[in-house]
Amino acid sequence: MPVIHLVFVTIMTQITAQINYIGVNDHDLDLFESQYRIPEGISYNSYLILDQKVAIMDTVDAGKKDEWLQHLESGLQGRQPDYLVVHHVEPDHAGAIALLLEHYPQIQVVASAKALQMLPQFFEGLDLAGRSLAVKEGDTLSLGGHTLQFFAAPMVHWPEVMVSYEQQEKILFSADAFGKFGALDIEDDDWACEGRRYYFNICGKYGAQVQMLLKKLGGLDIQAICPLHGPVLNEDLPYYLGLYQTWSSYGVETEGVFIAYASIHGGTAAVAEKLAEMLRARGVPKVSLSDLSRDDQAEAVEDAFRMDRMVLAASSYDAGVFPPMQEFLHHLQAKNYQRRKVGIVENGSWAPSAGRVMKEALQAMKEIEIIEPTVTIRSRMKKSDLPALEALADALSK
């Protein structure tokens, strides 16, 4: 992995001579989208282009609108904004639009036609008549010395999304693409860790759409990427673009085996640990485990996509599978898990059913190869179970 150089920004920070960061950090929120843990917070990114015309690039979540407005007013230095460019109408980016329109009634909202249609759903009584400009693929907007070119990015990760490319400074305003969890006042040299968790849980279902966007951007000379979450990326751009190419094509980032287990009384957990020991002894380059009952499911989804092989180990429960595993399988299917090899370990004291349920779920996913043998444990692992577990370890190690 290359040395990663990022622009970490807090309050108003200069990106170039005429482009400033005016976003905010949020350490008050515990769950992003009410489901993803963010112990290091999140940033809501907004940018300001000061030219002959002044453009604001997105707003922030309503909970931080007052702080953002202070950053904006400081950055404007007494000037009046001409345009608000809305790349994405999700509330964490568009939550301050009504406040902005109150303060600057002359401002024109620039967005995709779909975004302009959706915005009144979030703000009752919002009237954009005569104060909006719908842009489509390839359209440009001149600010004077700077020109924005727009590209549609539907389902990355909502249907109205667009990105914009500033032609003079060669900056891509990428909406949710290339974002990551974590506030910008937290020092973090490993962008990929939270960037990966963010990608697969927010955009993972839409790999084909991300691929389409990457093809559109392929001919552009991009010198910096300004996402709506996370740091500005201004060095090692082939590294980030390469990761997005791998992730969106459902390729393999790391050779290894991820073991996801759901254990009621510890018996299945012991089997998972033993299998991990066997795999390491066979030279598998990376083996990681996740306790689905306790660990972050979003991180488990991340590791499932990251590695080329996975093992599902679960207890049987109510003639089905233990609910933490059921939830994990639901997340995998929802995020379009595919093109992987998967082994299965089931545990059942009287009528093992977990293996059947896990296989049925996997068979509904694309290009999943189930590695045999399926290992069945009765309550607790015994010496007689080891040959089958060794055989599974052999098959996974090939």
Image (spheres, rainbow, N blue to C red):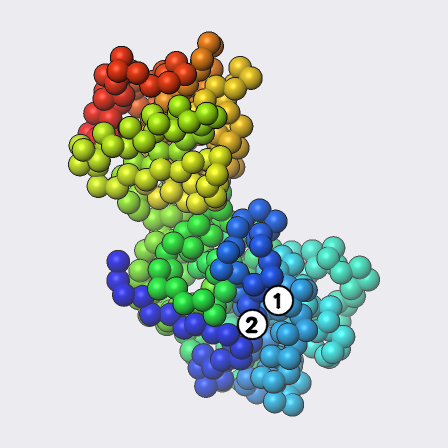
Horizontally, is 354 left or right of 125 in the view? left
Tell me which numbered mark, 2 or 1, is placed earlier along the sequence: 2
Residue lying at 44% horizontally and 50% vertically, measured from the top left: 197
Please identify the quadrant where the N terminus is shown. bottom left
Whether tag 2 and tag 1 are in contact, CB under 8 A, the answer is: yes
What residue is drawn where x is 59% and y is 68%? Answer: 58
Judged from the image, the secondary structure of the residue bearing numbered disc 2 is loop
Report the amino acid beneath label 2.
Gly
Q: What is the x, y in percent for residue 89?
A: 63, 59
Q: Position of residue 65 (x, y in %)?
A: 67, 70
> Looking at the figure, which quarter contains the C terminus?
top left
Residue 110: tell me if it is visible.
Answer: no
* Within-10-Å neighbours for mark 1: few <14, some 14–19, many 20+: many
Q: Nearer the viewer, residue 144 or 179?
A: 179
**What residue did someone put label 2 on?**
23
Q: Is residue 386 left or right of residue 188?
A: left
User: In the rendered image of this protein, does residue 118 appear above or below residue 144?
Assistant: above
Q: Amino acid at mark 1?
A: Val
Q: Residue at x 28, y 39 (%)?
A: 287
Q: Which residue is denoted by mark 1 in the rendering?
A: 60
Is 56 located above or below residue 259 in the figure? Answer: below
Disc 1 is placed on an element classified as: loop
Instruction: Tell me the quarter of the picture where residue 5 sits.
Output: bottom left
Q: Work out which residue is located at the far top of the displayed protein and give it.
A: 350
Is 112 located above or below residue 18 in the figure?
above
